[in-house]
Image: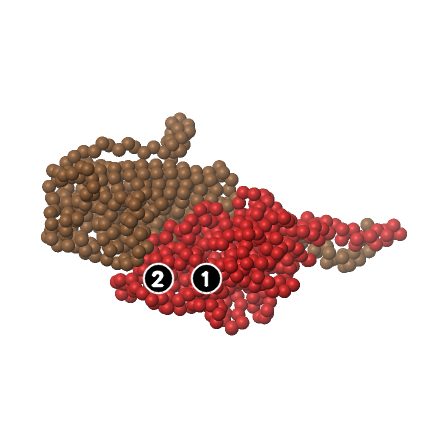
Chain colours: A brown, B red
């Protein structure tokens, strides 16, 4: 072979050969690169290119992301190795307002921690058949007005399960469920948030065996006007522990009405009907353990003090003809309620006035007594608020509409019962459990 | 030996042939074989921008000389994108045209391609630019599809990347101002955040009011709407004088303060802040031609803004420092900043315009604005 014999070839054509050689190397390197994995890019690519049915496993470790991760593909499972072992950290986030943003159906996320996002940690928007399981969503610096509003934030979802999860540090709510239907929220822990749990404008919701502690308020069940989905109802809140929710309210004023949630609120139920609150342990919430109110008591009155914009009125005031601001058919029974109301939040005028009038402390169950004059049912309990078997829990209807002139302490007008609400069933979750061999519960 | 010598003589040619074949495989050097734009209407979309043949001649050298039928355009007031220079083109298949609309993006035919390239000045080289990315928006049979192509270091080719890497940008501009930041290129999911309305991806820029301006074409200056009609890309359009026209945000000599501010808000905010947009739920609507003080946030509480300090209202007439609108435009902190994506630095001139406009507004101080 001549180029081997005279040795001139290599010097003559070295540049071409080198080029050819490097080209081959590049082709090899491109096909099987072992550069350090950029998890942000890698995981986002997996989420974009996932096919329905994909299970995306995230390994153990703490991975840093500086922009929102997002998913729009249906039927994807995102799974880590444990809420404290697989951590998606958004500390120092540069772009995007969420940690993980999901706009997809049939989505399951489990065994993952999400930390320190700029805005909400986990948002699931408009999905059917959503499972959030053993997820920890947290701001690691603790309570701070600069934390994101919501830790776990499914909104406009159907068939939604949130279980065995943990939320900490949210400047609005740790675990929020809004404008959704067929929802089970169970065995979660929510602490050091402004609100532990919020169930907003949602229908057919079971919230049970959850813990809410060291939040500003433990759990809210309510409807707000001017959201696309109206008419939230049928909510059961049972066997929860709502304890020591006395963390000073740290919501920034720009977050709206949550800024005025009284520090030391246990459970509040506002502007909704068909709510059953039973078997809960509700203790040591320093303003009030159970707060049953009309929209104006919770939100509208404080807005009247500050808002002069017609659009604010439109958004937060019930000019929305679909909106119903009254509380109706709420049954509070068989709860273990004690130790609350010892030092009401003096920021909130109505609370301070009442506490002052009552010698410093508030009763366990406070009802504002605002009833719809148009209701056909008249009498002392037109709103059908039924309260029974709550041990020695004290009560006050503080007659908000009548300027607190006719307060009622006696429970006898409220010693009614309401039919038990049916349990929520989520077909997709039931199917998943029954598909597990040997009858084992898929967990 | 004679045989060997002949072989040696042929060798460079053979080698070059091998290299050429390899080059075809690796670089895709088929440009020049096809004259017109190549249209791809379904997956898989080409990995290389050159495959679309949107640019003529060498096509792949970053000169962005448009191919036949690829029409350049620009907008009266564009979206601010970190001071990037943006080069926009549109192409439609032969025989098809867009239907004119007064107040919304035109109704574009299947096969329409929008091409937008982003470039930044090169440090120390006056007048030289570095192409970073070219975004395509392609009207397929079922939907608009966003395709981000990222240019290589040599600006010889751009490749499709669903999750592009951020790019460090450093240069000193003509005014002597230093720029040093990380330019985040949106991934394909993020395209939807701005472009979706009622969950349907739409073009944002190509509306009558934005296009209604003169453009320096190679054959002379012409109004863009008129030119689109002439080349057959637009039907049903009125004379430019009868079509809506947005102000040029920076033309303070010829346009009123309010016209410039409203045009700026339209093109920087209204893609989300309108009914059906990502921020439609806030009730704020910044579309030009829909001005309403309340809908622009005057004395309005934000719905769920992040931490705005003690600011309570989106817009306090006469008081930019108390206006959340201004605060968010001046921020680069995620969750606080607006827009939420697609901006990494503050648009100082844009902020100055909005400040001046808010200051000029008369009226309510929004009741008891909290002391600061």
Q: Residue at x 79, y 54 (%)?
A: B12
Residue B263: give its label: 1
Percent across and percent down for residue B22 are: 70, 49
Q: Which residue is drawn at 47% across and 68% down?
A: B255
Looking at the image, is mark 1 or mark 2 earlier in the sequence?
1
Percent across and percent down for residue B300 are: 32, 57
What whole-number distance in Å separates the C-alpha atoms at marks 1 and 2? 17 Å
Same subunit, tags 1 and 2: yes
Mark 2 belongs to chain? B
The outermost residue toward the right is B2
A409 horizontally vs A236: left or right: left
Percent across and percent down for residue A328 are: 22, 40
Q: Can residue B306 be seen in this view?
A: no
**Quarter-wise, where is residue B369 in the image?**
bottom left
Of residues B230 and B191, which is closer to you in this image? B230
Mark 1 belongs to chain? B
Of residues B215 and B13, which is closer to you in this image? B215
Residue A358: give its label: none
- In what element is the residue under mark 2? loop
Percent across and percent down for residue A7 are: 79, 56
Q: Give the label, 1 or 2, closer to the camera.
A: 1
Is A74 situated above or below A438?
A: below
Q: Residue at x 44, y 68 (%)?
A: B256
Residue at mark 2: B315
Q: Residue at x 41, y 32 (%)?
A: A432
């Amino acid at each position: 072979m001549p180029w081997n014999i005279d040795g001139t070839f290599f010097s003559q054509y070295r540049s071409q050969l080198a080029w050819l050689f490097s080209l081959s190397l590049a082709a090899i390197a491109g096909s099987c690169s072992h550069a350090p994995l950029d998890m942000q890019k890698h995981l986002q690519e997996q989420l974009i290119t996932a096919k329905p049915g994909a299970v995306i496993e995230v390994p153990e470790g703490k991975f840093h992301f500086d922009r929102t991760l997002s998913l729009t593909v249906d039927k994807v499972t995102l799974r880590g190795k444990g809420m404290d072992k697989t951590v998606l950290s958004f500390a120092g986030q540069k772009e995007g307002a969420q940690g993980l943003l999901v706009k997809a159906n049939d989505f399951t996320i489990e065994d993952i921690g999400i930390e320190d996002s700029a805005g909400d940690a986990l948002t699931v928007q408009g999905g059917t058949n959503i499972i959030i399981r053993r997820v920890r969503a947290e701001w690691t610096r603790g309570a701070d007005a600069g934390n994101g509003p919501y830790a776990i934030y499914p909104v406009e979802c159907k068939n939604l399960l949130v279980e065995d999860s943990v939320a900490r540090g949210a400047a609005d709510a740790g675990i929020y469920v809004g404008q959704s239907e067929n929802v089970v929220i169970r065995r979660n822990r929510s602490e050091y948030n402004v609100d532990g749990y919020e169930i907003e404008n949602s229908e057919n919701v079971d919230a049970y065996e959850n813990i809410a502690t060291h939040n500003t308020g433990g759990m809210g069940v309510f409807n707000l006007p001017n959201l696309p989905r109206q008419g939230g109802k049928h909510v059961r809140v049972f066997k929860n522990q709502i304890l020591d929710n006395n963390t000073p309210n740290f919501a920034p004023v720009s977050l709206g009405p949550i800024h005025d949630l009284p520090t030391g609120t246990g459970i509040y139920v506002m502007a909704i009907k068909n709510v059953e609150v039973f078997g809960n342990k509700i203790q040591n919430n320093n303003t009030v353990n159970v707060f049953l109110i009309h929209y104006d008591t919770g939100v509208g009155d404080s807005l009247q003090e500050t808002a002069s914009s017609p659009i604010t009125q439109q958004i937060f005031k019930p000019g929305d003809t679909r909106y119903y601001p009254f509380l109706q058919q709420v049954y509070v029974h068989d709860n273990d309620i004690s130790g609350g109301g010892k030092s009401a939040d003096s920021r909130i005028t109505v609370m301070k006035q009442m506490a002052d009038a009552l010698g410093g402390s508030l009763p366990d169950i406070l009802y504002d007594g605002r009833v719809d004059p148009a209701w056909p049912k008249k009498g002392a309990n037109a709103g059908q608020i039924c309260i029974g078997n709550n041990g020695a829990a004290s009560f006050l209807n503080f007659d908000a509409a009548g300027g607190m002139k006719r307060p009622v302490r006696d429970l006898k007008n409220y010693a009614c019962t309401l039919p038990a609400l049916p349990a929520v069933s989520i077909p997709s979750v039931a199917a998943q459990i029954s598909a597990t061999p040997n009858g084992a519960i898929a967990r | 030996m004679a045989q060997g010598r002949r072989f040696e003589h042929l060798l460079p040619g053979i080698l070059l042939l091998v290299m050429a074949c390899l080059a075809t495989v690796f670089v895709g050097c088929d440009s020049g074989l096809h004259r017109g734009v190549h249209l791809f209407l379904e997956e898989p979309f080409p990995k290389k921008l050159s495959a679309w043949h949107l640019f003529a001649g060498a096509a792949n050298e970053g000169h962005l000389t448009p191919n036949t039928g690829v029409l350049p355009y620009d907008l009266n007031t564009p979206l601010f994108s970190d001071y990037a220079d943006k080069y926009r083109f549109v192409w439609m298949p032969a025989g098809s045209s867009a239907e004119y609309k007064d107040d919304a993006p035109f109704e574009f035919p299947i096969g329409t391609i929008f091409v937008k390239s982003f470039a930044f000045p090169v440090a120390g080289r006056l007048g030289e630019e570095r192409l970073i990315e070219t975004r395509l928006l392609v009207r397929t049979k079922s939907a608009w599809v966003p395709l981000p192509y990222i240019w290589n270091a040599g600006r010889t080719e751009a490749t499709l990347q669903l999750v592009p890497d951020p790019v460090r940008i450093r240069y000193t501009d003509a005014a002597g101002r230093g720029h040093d930041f990380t330019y985040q290129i949106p991934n394909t999911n993020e395209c939807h955040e701005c472009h979706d309305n009622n969950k349907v991806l739409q073009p944002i820029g190509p509306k009558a009011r934005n296009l209604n301006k003169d453009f320096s074409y190679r054959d002379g200056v012409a109004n863009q709407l008129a030119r689109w009609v002439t080349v057959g890309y637009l039907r049903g359009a009125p004379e430019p004088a009868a079509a809506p026209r947005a102000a040029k945000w920076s033309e303070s000599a010829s346009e009123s303060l309010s016209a410039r501010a409203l045009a700026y808000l339209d093109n920087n905010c209204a893609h989300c802040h309108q009914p059906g947009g990502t921020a439609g739920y806030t009730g704020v609507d910044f579309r030009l031609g829909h001005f309403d003080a309340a809908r622009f946030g005057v004395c309005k509480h934000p719905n769920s803004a992040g931490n705005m300090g003690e600011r309570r209202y989106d817009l306090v007439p006469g008081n930019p420092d108390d206006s959340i609108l201004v605060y968010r435009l001046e921020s680069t902190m995620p969750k606080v900043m607006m827009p939420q994506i697609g901006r990494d630095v503050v648009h100082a001139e844009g902020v100055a315009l909005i400040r001046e406009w808010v200051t000029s507004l008369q009226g309510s101080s929004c009741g008891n604005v909290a002391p600061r």
